[in-house]
Amino acid sequence: MRTEDFRKPTQGPAFMTLLLAMFLYAVSLIKFFVRDPLSLRTGLQGPIEIGLVILAALVLAVVFRQRYWNFLWTPSAVAFMAFGAMATLSSVYSYYPLLSFLKGLSFLLVCGIAVVASSAFGPKNVITSLYRSLMIILAIGLIAKVAGGGPLLSIDDYSGRARFTLFAWHPGTLADLCALTLLTGLLLPKRPPLYCQIFLFAINVATASRASSALLVIILVSIRLATVRLSPRFLFLCCCFGSVLTLAMLVMIQKQGQPAEMITIGQSLHGDKLAEDLITFSGRKEVWSAAEPLVSHSLFLGYGLDGSRDVLINNTTWGAGNAHNSLLDLILAAGFPAMLVFFAGWATAVKSAWQWRMFTRIGVLEAYTYIAAFGIFSPNLTYLQGLSSFLILTMDAMVFAEISQCEARGRRYFPMIEHYMPRQVAESWKRMPRRSL
């Protein structure tokens, strides 16, 4: 792809087309209705999701007819598309073949939208449009929640936690969405306002999703440390501030708080089964045990996306509708070979980001870290209309675009540099990511 193809306008009718496509895709992430997970009727939720994804693809198809550009097929894009094809083929073994088939097609469309949008408008513009769309949807959801007059928090039947959610999302799904949106904001060409990031972080914490919030805090702190010069004075000030803050909290608890009140507050945040949840991973070990027989039958093909839901629900005491693990979810969806292809594609994206030395590297790698770590507890690579996979493809395209731009600049300003280099040095120079000139 030519370097000029990444310099897309951020205003005008073309950009509004991209914004419309990303808004349609963002709306498709919303869960409007709660249905019986084993029912063979999807209700309106299924047609809404697939319909909005198709509309987003059609909007981009109109632009494709009006413009000429090459597709940006990164190795990760090829691998994810191959996985989607295998998952769609595996739907013949699903407990509900039509549903799994449509989910497989939807995943392919989402990957295709990421490739087409990044090729036509540039990855940074795609991420900017998606971030704005998600912020609008979350703000509308919050306004509707407050205006509805109902309780803002609901008590989790399993753990007793008071949890916040919007629309009909599961609180953990909403937490993952807010965390991904917040981390995506760190990659924008122009940093979003601080109140937007605080808004996303507050919702993530209010959902009482312990794993998501803990991972998000760790990643945000690590990003800050990676971008700040760690002098002895800075570390000393941080230790002093932490000591003073801890001392102030202990004094406040001793003088004003009662032990019973503190226990009640703690239970509302982490529930009354914290010790048990730490051992069983909130009941996920039971789900993983129930999935073992299915994994042994997925050597070549799987059961399609959500195709093994009936077995997991009927063999767990709390009716788990999915494997609650991305690795198991990929295997059950498309089989072992497809899972290996998927992770091989993602590994190439991680390698490209690791070798790159621009600031983008930090944000992209931290986003990859969150997706991988949270995937231990959630099938986040295929759920939420494949949002995590969409972001991986777009971020990989962003790194590829920056590397291509810098290499093009280097050859433009130093056209004879390779001619006078020793052969081995020249080959290394070609492979080495360039800084901006």
Image (spheres, grey):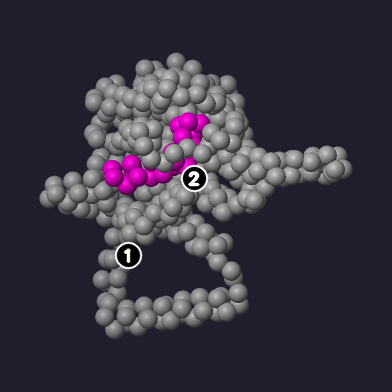
Q: Residue furthest right?
A: 422
Where residue 22 sits: x, y (%)?
Answer: 37, 35
Please state which of residues 16 and 433 is positioned toward the viewer in this rendering: 16
Is 124 magenta? The answer is yes
**x, y percentage for residue 375?**
48, 43
Q: Position of residue 428 (x, y in %)?
A: 78, 43
- The alpha-carbon separation of the residues under discs 2 and 1 comes to 27 Å
Could you tell me residue 138's position as x and y percent?
29, 46
Q: Earlier in the sequence, mark 2 or mark 1?
A: 1
Please tell me whether residue 318 is drawn above or below residue 162 in the rendered image: above
Quarter occupied by residue 161: bottom left
Q: What residue lies at 24% left-to-right and 26% top-to-bottom? A: 44
- The range drawn in magenta is 117-137
Neighbour tally class for label 2: few under 14, some 14-19, many 20 plus, Cα within 10 Å:
many
Query: The residue under label 1 is which amino acid type?
Result: Gly
The answer to whether residue 115 is magenta is no
Residue at the disc numbered 1: 266
Q: Main secondary structure of the magenta part?
A: helix
Farthest residue toward the top? Answer: 92
- Please report the residue visible at 35 percent of the width from the left and 83 percent of the height from the top: 251
Circles 2 and 1: CB atoms closer than 8 Å: no
Residue at the (55%, 26%) spot, across then down:
70
The correct choice, above or below, for 206 with respect to 330 in the image is below
Q: Residues within 10 Å of mark 1 (few under 14, many from 20)?
A: few
Q: Which residue is rendered at x = 66% and y = 40% of the image?
A: 408
Badge number at residue 371: 2
Label 2 residue SS: helix
Q: Residue furthest left?
A: 149
Picture disc at residue 414:
none
Q: Amino acid at mark 2?
A: Ile
Depth check, front residue: 101 or 132: 132
Q: Quadrant of the N terminus?
A: top right
